[in-house]
Image (tube, grey):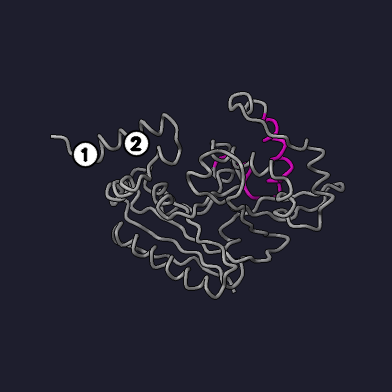
């Protein structure tokens, strides 16, 4: 039976905090009987009408989840970007070339992709680095902190938006399928500082591509349907819908907890944005 997203509408920011605490308390109770459960993961969106789409889906129509959105083609693109990224970041990643990567997929064709990539740590680390710096990514980023997710929901709210949303998912270790395999990438990796500042996890969804001249490949798939279909009977997917007019209250409350753009990004630009928000948005100057 297909699992549905459970939408929880709240009237104000304080109510959303209480609802989230109730969710966390329920998780602690379940963990005593099901210790294999992963933690609740949260994702904030500045418009409640937006779905759980990756930046790759949103930014580039040619890379949407269809038969052309293949892993090996995407891998060639991120390798082409690597010299520029390494030059200006001062970092280096030792990655297989496209032929070697294709051979890895072929040699491990009977394994799930997350197992294959789990043995190639630097590929994951490079993918996460790119994701945190705006390169279109098949990774959907999550956080174990509902407050970090709330900051992302309220940080930049488009004009005329009435509601923002915070998604919460408690995934089980579902088996998935060859056409739609959803999996998570955990927190233990060496990559950019933002990964740790934001307490991140990541999700990806792929299906097996039809072999073309003996080539083994994967196709990127939409994630929200996969979360409903593939994660097993104990999966939970919640969507907290919060009025956008609560933005000032929420941002002030989060800032008092030291959750703001600077604490999560650590850049000079985010510092100036945080200070400007305190002086121009929070304070009432006479």
Which quarter of the rendering shows the C terminus? Answer: top left
The answer to whether residue 159 is magenta is no
Q: Could you say whether the residue bearing mark 2 is in a helix, strand or loop?
A: helix
Q: Residues within 10 Å of mark 1 (few under 14, many from 20)?
A: few
User: Does the residue at mark 2 contact the one at mark 1 (Cβ under 8 Å)?
Assistant: no
Q: Could you say whether the residue bearing mark 1 is in a helix, strand or loop?
A: loop
For image coordinates 61% across by 42% down, the residue present is 190
Residue 283 shows which numbered tag?
A: 1
Q: Is residue 102 left or right of residue 62?
A: right
Estimate the x, y position of residue 95 in percent, counting from the top left: 73, 37
Residue 100 shows which numbered tag?
A: none
The answer to whether residue 61 is magenta is yes
What residue sits right under mark 2 in the picture?
274
For image coordinates 77% across by 38% down, the residue present is 96
Which quarter of the rendering shows the N terminus? Answer: bottom right
Residue farthest top in this picture: 87
Estimate the x, y position of residue 281 in percent, counting from the top left: 26, 39
Q: What is the count of numbered marks?
A: 2
Estimate the x, y position of residue 230 in percent, counting from the top left: 63, 65
User: Distance between the Cα atoms at labels 2 and 1?
Assistant: 13 Å
Q: Is residue 175 left or right of residue 233?
A: right
Tell me the magenta residue range. Answer: 59-82
């Amino acid at each position: 039976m297909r699992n549905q997203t459970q939408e929880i509408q709240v009237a104000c920011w304080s109510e959303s905090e209480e609802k989230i605490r109730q969710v966390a308390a329920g998780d602690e109770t379940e963990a005593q009987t099901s210790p294999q459960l992963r933690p609740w993961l949260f994702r904030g969106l500045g418009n409640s009408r937006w779905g759980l789409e990756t930046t790759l889906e949103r930014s580039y129509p040619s890379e949407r989840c269809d038969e052309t959105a293949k892993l090996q083609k995407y891998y060639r693109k991120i390798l082409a970007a690597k010299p520029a990224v390494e030059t200006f970041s001062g970092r280096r990643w030792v990655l297989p070339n496209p032929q070697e990567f294709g051979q890895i997929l072929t040699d491990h064709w009977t394994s799930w992709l997350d197992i294959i990539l789990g043995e190639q740590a630097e590929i994951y680390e490079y993918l996460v680095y790119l994701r945190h710096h705006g390169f279109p990514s098949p990774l959907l980023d999550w956080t174990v902190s509902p407050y970090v997710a709330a900051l992302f929901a309220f940080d930049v709210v488009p004009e005329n938006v009435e509601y923002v949303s915070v998604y919460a998912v408690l995934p089980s270790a579902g088996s998935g399928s060859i056409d739609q395999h959803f999996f998570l990438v955990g927190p233990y990796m060496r990559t950019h500082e933002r990964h740790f500042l934001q307490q991140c996890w990541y999700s990806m969804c792929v299906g097996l591509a039809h072999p073309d001249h003996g080539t083994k490949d994967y196709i990127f798939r939409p994630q929200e349907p996969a979360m409903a279909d593939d994660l097993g009977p104990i999966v939970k997917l919640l969507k907290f819908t919060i009025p956008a007019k609560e933005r000032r209250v929420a941002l002030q409350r989060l800032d008092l907890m030291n959750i703001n753009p600077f604490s999560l990004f650590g850049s000079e630009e985010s510092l100036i944005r945080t200070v400007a928000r305190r002086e121009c948005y929070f304070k009432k100057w006479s």
